[in-house]
Amino acid sequence: MNPSLSIEEQVLLERALQAARDTRFLAVEAGIRHDAARLFASAFGNETAFLVADQRTYAAAGRDVQESFRRAGIACAEPFLFGPEVYAEHSFVEALQSALAANRAIPVAIGSGTINDLTKLAAHRLGRPYMVAATAASMDGYTAYGASITYRGSKQTFDCPAPRAVLADLEVIARAPAEMNAAGYADLLAKGVAGADWILADAAGAEAIHPAVWTTVQSFLPAWIDRPGGIVRAESACLQRLIVGLMMSGFAMQAARSSRPASGADHQFSHLWDMQHHTHNGAAPSHGFKVGIGTLASLALYEALLRRDLASLDIDAAVAAWSSWEQVEARITLLLGSGELAEKAKEETRAKYPTPDVLYAQLQRLRDGWPALRERLQQHLFPFRNARALLREAGCPHQPEQIGISRQRLRHSYEQAYYIRRRFTVLDFAMRLGVFDATLDELFGPAGAWAKEGGQS
Ligand SMILES: [Zn+2]
């Protein structure tokens, strides 16, 4: 199915597909859109297909997919085409749902993040499986469990199964806007931090690693990200590895029923800026571009923490200095105001707020395991400078200002990002050690990674 992948990659892919709960069929190949009918028939038998696209994605792949159904004699309802104003908002789910309710057909989403998420949720609400034909390697959500949809003004993740069948035509992906594939590259690069955060959570006793799932995402990651220039030039082999890496991340999330395998502190920066409705030049930067900056922010923090020697950590002093819950609430109010975002942050932080005994135990595990843990993290993570160079070469923003985030705002974002999710990450590590502010002083100081506005690139 994937002739240019190594045997080991194909084996891993096959295993990941078997472990995935919802997705049963994956086809990644140049020209595969012309064969969409065969994949559809394998996954759904004699059902009728119902194409969901917008004008652009219909032209990019939808027309050829429809033609393949016609040739194969598979019944196809009149395609549902969204207008150019479509975005991942709940009213568009409702519109699609009522169109789908008029028949019993199987939806076939033709598009990327938005159309996939709208179709995923609408199909689930009608109790139907669905198929997706990807039109860009822009994020890992194709095969992820759940849909990210704005509802009543705030972005939410709705529980719903991933597609049963996924098709990615490398010819179509190669013609996608360059910044979309670049965004997918940044979303994939972030998995390095996501994996490190899981190592850390496991070491602290906060969340055990699921080895098979961890391996699905991490074992080929260095190979998947090592040719960023090939993404810009739309080289087929590079795009194939990019899309396979993104799909595998989705399978890992399906297997874990959690985004943990593919999302750590890197994504929390992005979620924070989403929750703050951040825009730059009149539009929200893409998910991948925000995650790319979140990845750099996380790597910078890791590097500063890995320079420390935890052997001399005074655990009693760290526990004594730990903020009371009242102090934490006051801090959240100061940093995030008193609206919905602050309420959400309190709920999330409460869920991970340790009693003194738990904090003591976590710090003891981290300190005692430090030499081995530090070595494992150093081997696993790529240096901040390398990651920044990779992002630049892939055509991604590699300075926060490029997505409209000033140094000062980035500094606030570190602490805000800590509060908005219950997940244990490098942010929790710094907070529990009692070195959060001191480490940020280093990062934003004259010799730090975030030394000055528009610093060296
Ligand atoms: Zn992502």
Image: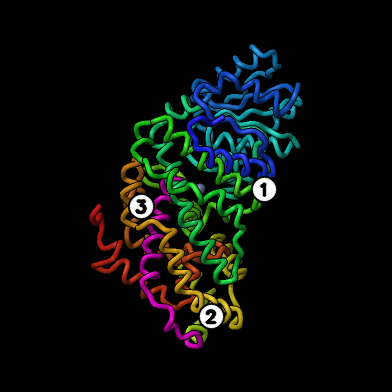
- Amino acid carrying label 2: it is Gln
The number of numbered discs placed on residues in the rendered structure image is 3
Q: Quadrant of the N terminus?
A: top right
Packing grade of label 1 (10 A; few <14, some 14-19, many >=20) is some
Q: Residue at x 62, y 68 (%)?
A: 351
Q: Residue at x 48, y 47 (%)?
A: 220
Is 372 situated above or below 218?
A: below
Magenta: main secondary structure: helix
Give the magenta range: 288-317
Q: Which residue is mark 2?
A: 364
The answer to whether residue 150 of the structure is visible from this angle is yes
Nearer the N terminus, badge 1 or badge 3?
Answer: 1
Which label number is shown at residue 2?
none
Front disc: 1 or 3: 3
Q: Which residue is mark 1?
A: 159
Q: Secondary structure at mark 3?
A: helix
Which label number is shown at residue 387?
3
Is 77 situated above or below 414?
A: above
Q: State yes or no: residue 289 in magenta.
A: yes
Packing grade of label 3 (10 A; few <14, some 14-19, many >=20) is many
User: CA gap, disc 3 to disc 2?
Assistant: 31 Å
Is 57 situated above or below 64?
A: below
Is 227 situated above or below 60?
A: below
Q: State yes or no: residue 333 in magenta.
A: no
